[in-house]
Amino acid sequence: MAASEHEGTVPEYILRAPVVVSVREQPPNNCTVEPLTFIVKGTTCRGRIFIPHRDREGNVLKSSEPTRIIVMAHGFCCLQTFEPMNTLVRAFVLAGLSCTTFDYRGFGESDTPSSSQWQYINPIMLLEDWREAIREISRRYQHASIGLWGTSFSGGHVIQMASEHRSDSPRELSGGVVVQAAVSWVGCMNYDGSRLPTSLTKTRFLWEYTRSLLSPQRMLKVCGVHGEVCVCDGHVEVAEIASLASSRGDVEWANATPPSSFLRCMGYAPGKKAPQVHCSVLFIAAGQDNITPPEYILEAAALAPKAELLMMPEAHHCEIYFLPLLTQVAERTVAFFGAKLP
C-alpha cells in the first residue's frame, strides 16, 4: 500500500472510537485485582491479575482462586494499558474468566535491564518474559488451566509458547506447565513477510542505525506521516496508534524504538512452530493486513493440529481493535476460551 493512499484520510472507525479508561485506573467491577511481579534475569516485570467474583450468569464463583486464567501481552512497541486489552480484560471478567496482563522488560511499568535500552524489541527477550510470566502464574495457581492471548507481534509469541508448553515437552523447556488453549489476533507468523507502508529506504535505515551506535539513546519513530523518518508511513497508522495509546494514563511510552530492534527481529517466524502446537488455537486474520499478511496466518492455521480460523476479509491490521469489529472478535475469543479451557 503506497503512502499516498493514506494521505489525509482517517477512517470513521478511528474518529468514532470511544474514549477508554485503562483497567489500571478503573478496574472492572466484581473482580479482585492482584499485582503481578516476576523477575527475568535480574529485571522485574510488572502486571496485574484480574480475578472475577461471578460467572457469566452472575453466580458467585465457588473458589476465590482462578480455575481458568488467560495470560495476555500486547504487540510491537505497545503496553498492557493499550486498547484492545482493556476491553478484552473486561470481557473476560464479565464471562467469569480470570486473566493477567504484563509489560515486557523495558516497557511501561516494568524495569529496563541495565544491559539493554528503553523500549528495545528483541524476540528472544520477549519470549523469556512470556515464559516467566506463564511459570509465575502456574506457581501461584497450581490447579488453574492456562490459556494464552496475544496480538500482532505477541500473536506470534503465543504460538511459540504453546509449542513449548505441551504435556510431552521437556521439563527444562516448559517448566512443567501445559497450555490448554491459545488465541492469536492478526499474529506475526513471519516478521520478514510484513508489507509495511514505508518510505524509509534501506540506505536511510542503515544511516539511522549507524547514528544510534554513536548515540545509544537515539530512537526511530515507528508510526509517522509521509515525509517523517519513520518505519510505518501513513496517516491511518498514526491515528490508530494514537487512539490505542490514549488509555495508557500516566505510564511513560514513546512511539519509537531503537533502530537495532528491527534488525534483531529479522528472521523471526514463530508460525513455523504451528505443527508443534497440540492445544486448541484460534487464529484471527485480517484480509487486507499489510503488517501481518494473512497468508502467513492461514499457513500456520493449516499446520496447527487443533486450529480454528476467523477471517475478517475486508479488515486492515488494527481495524479489529476498533468497533464494530472489536465486539465480534472479542466475543469469539471469550467463547473460545470458555469452551476450550477445562
Image (cartoon, grey):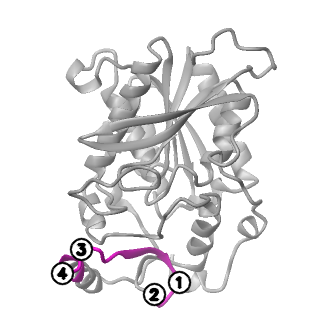
Element on which disc 2 rests: loop
Instruction: Name the kind of residue labelled 1 in the image.
Output: Val
Give the number of the disc on residue 26: none
Above or below, comparing residue 334 to residue 23 in the picture: above
Q: Which residues are magenta?
A: 211-227
Is residue 226 among what the camera can see?
A: yes
Residue nearest the viewer, comparing 232 with 194: 232
Cα separation, mark 2 vs mark 1, equals: 6 Å
Q: Which residue is mark 2?
A: 228
Instruction: Name the kind of residue labelled 4 in the image.
Output: Leu
Quarter-wise, where is residue 69 in the image?
top right
Cα separation, mark 4 vs mark 3, equals: 6 Å
Q: Quadrant of the C terminus?
A: top right
Q: Which residue is mark 3?
A: 216
The residue mark sitting in front, 4 or 2, is: 4
The residue mark sitting in front, 1 or 3, is: 3
| Residue for point 75% across, 62% down | 17
Instruction: Name the kind of residue labelled 3 in the image.
Output: Pro
Above or below, comparing residue 205 to residue 154 in the picture: below
| Residue for point 40% across, 29% down | 134
Q: Which residue is mark 4?
A: 214
Residue 299's spot in the image, x, y percent? 41, 44
Q: Residues within 10 Å of mark 4 (few under 14, many from 20)?
A: few
Q: Which residue is mark 1?
A: 225
Quarter-wise, where is residue 54 in the image?
top right
Q: Residues within 10 Å of mark 2 (few under 14, many from 20)?
A: some
